[in-house]
Image (cartoon, rainbow, N blue to C red):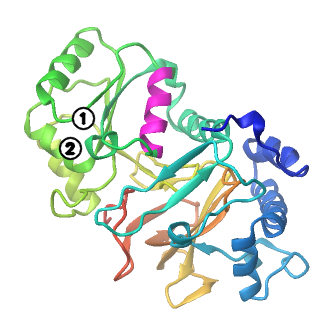
Amino acid sequence: MMHKDTLIFPPERESLRNRVFKVNSERTRHELMLEVFRYQFKYNEVYRNWSLAFNRNPENVQQVTDIPFLPLSFFRHHAIRSGFTHDTLVFRSSGTTAALTSVCHVADPNLYEESFVNGFIRRYGQPSNYVFIGLLPSYLERSDSSLIYMVKHLMDSGKPGGAFYLHNYEALRDDLTVLRESNAKVWLIGVSFALLDFAAFSPPCWENLSVLETGGMKGRRREMIREELHAEIRKHWNVPEIHSEYGMTELFSQAWTRVDGRFECPPWMQVQIREADDPLALAPFGKTGGIDVVDLANLDTCAFISTADLGRMSADGSFEVLGRFDHAEIRGCNLMIG
């Protein structure tokens, strides 16, 4: 593994890097989007060639609606790097079959950490207020999972008592009982199929237990719509809400659910909905279409990604995830059909 200090970045990067988490308005986000587009056009050969295929370049991209989005599938077939040649970390998507998985080349792990920590803080407060428990068996069995990296960092930043669990539900139940008796504020972050299995095991619940589902069924159970999944968990757990996050291996940032269950992005991230039959046209509010993601924390890969997910946007900027396009490969991120 190469240390970050050995990496040499283009001179423009430092200014862009310092501004990612200072975005505080639509205007500043749009300004930075245009600058990041120019940077990645210059230093990312794959993205530059894709942009040129649509006759898009820094001269004629004058507003954010002109920026082209790179299909997520390119991460399976190309090394998506902007301005660096060596990796500090490599994350790989989990997948559910033997199909080729996506690879995210990470030059600056600190940038990833800043993104998910700042996003968590905006929604839930300081990680140091909580104990983090990971029930992520399908991820924990791998060494290159971005989700495990994120939960481990939150765990290390949180109160003592955090741990990962595979299938040892008795130990998890016993440890949660101890945490309950100490009145600790606990986050149980679990892959969907494992949460259902553990819910049937009748674990203890209390008002300071927060449950975050992520990761889908991994082929272990039939896929459910999000409301059905949450209702099934609540049959066993008396918790006020089940939380979710919209993220994936190829993104450094996550959108988190609000109290009403809709997803909301941090300021440096933006989701927009494209027309299902026209990848260059935006769908109006309330209409179902494909999800495009702007993630300005993806400075070193590609900040403009077109997914195979279906969603619907509201006028307030929140969005729903409604499933996937037909024939799209089922991936390992949190894509419950909602």
Task: Name the residue that disc number 2 marks.
Answer: 194
| Residue 148 is a magenta residue | yes
* Percent of width and height locating residue 94: 37, 55
> Tag 1 or tag 2, which sits nearer the N-term?
2
Q: Residue at x 20, y 44 (%)?
A: 194
Q: Amino acid at mark 1?
A: Val
Q: State the residue position of label 1.
A: 239
At numbered mark 2, what does the secondary structure look like: helix, strand or loop? helix
Which quadrant: the C terminus? bottom left
Distance from Cα at disc 2 to Cα at disc 1: 17 Å
Occupied quadrant, residue 75: bottom right
**Above or below, 283 relative to 155:** below
- Specify whether 78 is left or right of 169: right
Q: Residues within 10 Å of mark 1 (few under 14, many from 20)?
A: some
Q: Which mark is residue 338?
A: none
Residue farthest toward the left in the current orientation of the protein: 201
- Figure check: 219 above or below 50: above
Q: Position of residue 73 (x, y in %)?
A: 51, 72
Q: Nearer the viewer, mark 2 or mark 1?
A: 2
- Amino acid type, residue under disc 2 in the picture: Ala
Q: Closer to the camera, 199 or 308?
A: 308
**Residue numbers of the magenta segment:** 146-156
Instruction: Give the residue displayed 43% in from the left and 45% down from the top.
Output: 145
Asked if residue 56 is among those painted magenta in the image, a careful observer would answer no
Relative to 199, is 47 above or below?
below
